[in-house]
Image (tube, helix red, strand yellow):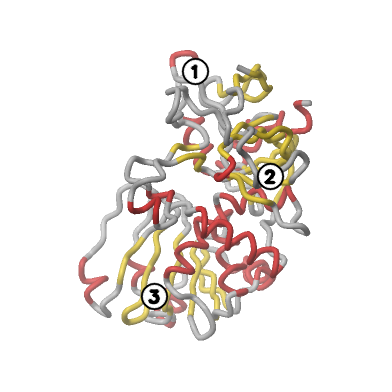
Amino acid sequence: MRNSTGWQAHGPREFHRVSIPRRDLRRDDVAVRVDFCGVCHTDLHAVREHRGEDGPLLVPGHEFTGVVTETGPDVTRFRVGDPVAVGNIVDSCGECALCAAGQENFCREFPTLTYGGTDRHDGSPTLGAFSREYVVRDRFAHPLPAGLDPAAAAPLMCAGVTVWEPLRALGVGPGTRVAVSGLGGLGHLAVKFAAALGAEVAVISRSPDRAAEAAELGAHDLVVSGDPDQMAAARDRFDVLIDTIPVPHDLGPYLRLVAVDGTLSHLGHLGPVTVETLDLLIGRKKLSSAGSGGLPATAAMLDFCAAHGITADVEVLPSADAALALDRLERGDVRHRFVLDLSDLS
């Protein structure tokens, strides 16, 4: 067993700097020095629900970039010194139909999560990347393309691929009319991706003040969700609506913006929703969802980002400010993703 240093949640609003156990490298493992780790709403929920000393050991962080420092004897994809990126899945059964189809994120035995999961080999809890080192199977690490800033690329590994997969599955491209509701970590990347894919993109926002920001990201229009006239004018307008709002909300007003045979992909809030059947019936509309991404899609997304110069818009904080980042995220005080710099753990 080896040790690293990281930030352990100690109740719902506090972190302690602690020594974190990391497994000795298996034959197909790589050790990664974690340089940058994004801060996700999942981290916020996990920490806020943590019970302190009565709860399980929790080290958040599941979208990170860094450098390979050691490799297992069977590893051929990476060498020491290679820059890599890792997302929120670090293992899967590798045998079910979904894994065989490159959808490890939907593994029938449930994928092993970067933190809050259980190692498939020794049963130990997985501890996340609010730490200076992570040990991962080499196939679940991705080469970080040259030219992508490692801090701004870290959120691509969760927020990015979460919106990338449904955009590709729904055939977004030239001639597609896309709306994005919510302009946070997921939403701003959905706008960038849809625009780069050639779609006509609009942002749906509560605030008219975000029009300039939406345009900078690549949107052609802004629809103010609180303006009944604008919402009525946009009825049946969009082929695809990517809903990234991270709190419970009524889907009805957004489904009414979807065109005949169009789709609303509900990504931001993972809790129960209530849908009026008529909102689907009128126009043969579809409601879908997605989560994370498989290994082929993640690799394709990174290649696309490198070709189009796409990364997240980030505010980088020292990792010692992890609690502050979560407090500000809870208040919505971020444009558009916090990233922790783990070098202060060296």
Judging depth in this view, the residue of 322 and 210 nearest the camera is 322
Q: Within 10 Å of the Cα at label 1, are there few (<14), some (14-19), or many (20+) other Cα atoms?
A: some
User: Where 150 sits versus 264, above or below?
Assistant: above
CA gap, disc 1 and disc 3: 44 Å
**Amino acid type for the residue under numbered disc 1:** Gly
Q: Nearer the viewer, mark 2 or mark 1?
A: 2
Q: CA distance from mark 2 to mark 3?
A: 46 Å
Above or below 156: residue 168: below
Comparing 326 with 107, the one in front is: 107
Q: Position of residue 337 (x, y in %)?
A: 64, 49
Q: Is 167 left or right of 305, judged from the image as shown?
A: left
Contact (Cβ within 8 Å) of mark 2 with mark 3? no
Q: Are marks 1 and 3 in contact (CB under 8 Å)?
A: no
Q: Residue at x 56, y 44 (%)?
A: 40
Locate residue 136: give its quadrant: top right
- Provide the residue designation for mark 1: 52
Amino acid type of the residue that numbered disc 3 sits on in the rendered structure: Leu
Q: Please rate how many residues cluster around mark 2, counting C-alpha atoms within 10 Å: few if below 14, some from 14 to 19, many from 20.
A: many
Q: Secondary structure at mark 2?
A: loop
Instruction: Judge left or right: residue 222 versus residue 262.
Output: right
Query: Mark 2 — residue?
Result: 78
Residue sitting at x 42%, y 30%: 120
